[in-house]
Image (cartoon, coloured by chain):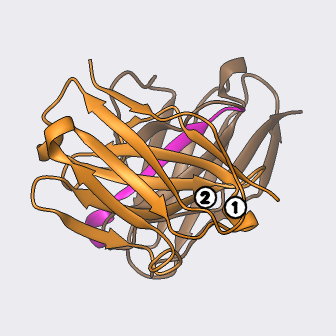
Chain colours: A brown, B orange
Amino acid sequence: EVVLTQSPGTLSLSPGERATLSCRASQSVNSNYLAWYQQKPGQTPRLLIYAASSRATGIPDRFSGSGSGTDFTLTISRLEPEDFAVYYCQQYGTSPWTFGQGTKVEIK
Amino acid sequence: EVQLVQSGVEVKKPGESLKISCKGSGYSFTSYWIGWVRQMPGKGLEWMGIMHPGNSDIRYSPSFQGQVTISADKSISTAYLQWSGLRASDSAMYYCARAPGRYPFENWGQGTLVTVSS
């Protein structure tokens, strides 16, 4: 199965700063079918990005995804207070689909 | 409006069986994949498996193969996740989620909390 490794484990930043989250796959992600989700405490995950770089419906343009093959990045251009959460990458190009272990973005 | 409504909180004893549900509405139930995701307390998301109710195609994660059974009843637009012998380590939040073909989980149920304790 495709193992996804996210880094860093925790990112401590201030509102207004730029966040850069990494997701590395153990093998090439088929068709770059890589998604990013946001999860806040006590809430269900929310799809942010699909196909590595396409924003899901209703997602603000401060969220952007990039990358291909085995290396992917989620960038939040300017952190808003509501963006402090845990972020997961997921590949859905090969069964079994797999998630990364998550990156927590916390307020510095 | 697309909705996935899951069954309520469950408290069970080790060895007991359990079947939790996820009812879809606001879309064609047989046209989308339905998957299940586990989240243990304070931990990350784990993909358990996925099913296409239209053709009954089911895929399991190797980590969950043989431990759970995924099924669906098209007539009532409901997907199921079941265990035949629960263990304490099955205590977790379980989410169902909808995926169009070649697309990730775009809609999620509210989650079902399962607690297994003697």
Q: Chain of mark 1?
A: A
Task: Compare residues B62 and B76 and report the one nearer the observer.
Answer: B76
Question: For numbered disc 1, what is the local secondary structure?
Answer: strand
Residue B44 image offset from top left, x and y in percent: 66, 55
* Residue occupied by mark 2: A22
Between the residue at mark 1 and the residue at mark 2, the CA separation in whole angstroms equals 5 Å
Circle 1 packing at 10 Å, graded few (<14), some (14-19), many (20+), is some
**N-terminal of the two: label 1 or label 2?**
1
Viewed as shown, does residue B24 lie left or right of A15? left
Q: Which quadrant does the C terminus of chain A fall into?
A: top right
Viewed as shown, does residue B105 lie left or right of A45? left
Q: Amino acid at mark 2?
A: Ser
Viewed as shown, does residue A100 lie left or right of A9? left
Question: For numbered disc 2, what is the local secondary structure?
Answer: strand
- Boundaries of the magenta span: A29-41
Q: Is residue A108 visible?
A: yes
* Residue sitting at x 28%, y 33%: B24
Q: Say yes or no: labels 1 and 2 on the same chain.
A: yes
Residue A32 on the magenta span: yes
Q: Amino acid at mark 1?
A: Ser
Residue A77 image offset from top left, x and y in percent: 59, 31
Circle 2 packing at 10 Å, graded few (<14), some (14-19), many (20+), is many
Task: Compare residues A66 and B113 and report the one nearer the observer.
Answer: B113
* Residue occupied by mark 1: A7
* Residue sitting at x 44%, y 38%: A47
Number of numbered labels in the structure image: 2
Residue B71 on the magenta span: no
Residue contact at pointers 1 and 2, CB within 8 angstroms = yes
* Residue sitting at x 44%, y 54%: B36
